[in-house]
Image (cartoon, rainbow, N blue to C red):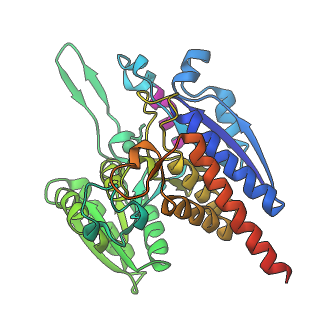
Amino acid sequence: MRLKLAVFAGDGIGPEVTREATNILRAVAELGGHEFTFVEGLIGGVAITETGSPLPTATLDAALDSDAVLLGAVGDNKFNALTPDKRPEAGLLQIRQALGGFANLRPSVAYAALAASSPLRPEVTKDTDILFVRELLGGLYFGTPRWWNKETNEAINTMRYTRDEVVRVARVAFELASKRRKKVTSVDKANVLEVSQLWRATVTEVAKDYPEITLEHQLVDSMAMHIMNTPRNFDVVLTENLFGDILSDEAGVITGSLGMLPSATIGGKVNLYEPVHGSAPDIAGTGKANPLGAILTAAMVLRHSANLEQDARAVEAAVHKVLAAGYRTADIARGGENVQLVSTQEMGKRVHQALAESIDRRQAMHAV
Ligand code: IPM
Ligand code: MN
């Protein structure tokens, strides 16, 4: 298996966590005899500082020329005074649009070993396994008109969707649900917004092609509550762009930390992989960052871009094993017994070790 990866580590803790993720990918390549190549590029605040643009042409070209893009994080307080189109985040939004992936998959899983890390009671989080499918190219993020008139003190953003945009992301959600627990919860605000009424009508129509899937609709406000009360009830959760942004951060509470959540964006020219967390400038360079979100994102690269499902599972199992053994970065160190605090790098090493052992075992089994 050959895979050409564009790696854009970005700002803050981006480079630290991305290093651990690429180490894991290198290990998988080595252990499995695959050929993975890595091309680095600038994005976000570091790109603005070096080139004046949050998404330099060289970065975009490298992305379009790759089989998959792995991104760290973007965002730097130094640029807080700038308008949205000039900020580091603009680089991320531009690359999302250029690559064309419209379905952003964000799994949120309650790890038994982390039951004490969540502020929610273990009996509430137990067995939770939600897959958010967040529409990534529409809604308020990209709708026009958008402006801020400083003379009249008026500003506007536009939540716009077309039927086709809803159909294509809904299909992804139903397809994924058919391989899981066969339930889709579609989130909207159809009691207030026309765009949500279009969303709900369209999702209901797409559901007719998937009779084996149960579809339910939830309003986003009560959904925010249900996710905390009964997270176990949800399987695939389909949302528009901003609702998915908000609810997926909320779902980080189930796992114990936003630092645990991976994501993959599919459906476009090149898949884009990024942990859900941000650049966390307050802890950058301290060794406190949790690399597991980035490492689990690497597992999603193996699953969705390399067709190496077994290796994706091996990486996920290695993460489980390391957590079960008690290793914790600061963000997940709350509660629990026999917990050992480790740095970003040490956490990466532990996962690597656990992975190497399991792949060795698999190869030994195949040999007999
Ligand atoms: C995310 C982030 C981004 C988003 C920002 C950094 C533009 O919060 O990936 O969830 O809002 O999509
Ligand atoms: Mn977000």
Residue 213: image location, x then y, percent: 38, 82
Q: Which residues are magenta?
A: 88-96
State the residue at coordinates (40%, 27%): 282
60 on left or right of 279: right
**Which residue is situated farthest in the left direction here?**
191
Q: Is residue 174 above or below residue 270?
A: below
Tell me what residue is drawn at x 56 percent, y 58 percent: 267
Q: What is the quadrant of residue 16 in the picture?
A: top right
Q: Nearer the viewer, residue 296 or 222?
A: 296
The C terminus sits in image quarter: bottom right
Q: Quadrant of the N terminus?
A: bottom right
Q: Is residue 43 shown left or right of residue 111?
A: right
| Residue 32 is one of the magenta-drawn residues | no
Name the residue furthest bottom.
212
In the foreground, 2 or 30: 30
Residue 124: percent from left, percent from top: 25, 68
Q: Which residue is rendered at x = 37% and y = 55% of the image?
A: 162
Whether residue 335 can be seen here? yes
Can residue 93 be found in the magenta stretch? yes
The furthest residue to the top:
151
Residue 135 x/y as whole percent: 41, 54
* Residue 266 pos. (x, y %): 55, 57
Please name the predominant secondary structure of the magenta segment in the image. helix
Looking at the image, in which quadrant does ligand 2 appear? top left
Which residue shows up at 47% across the image and 79% down it?
178
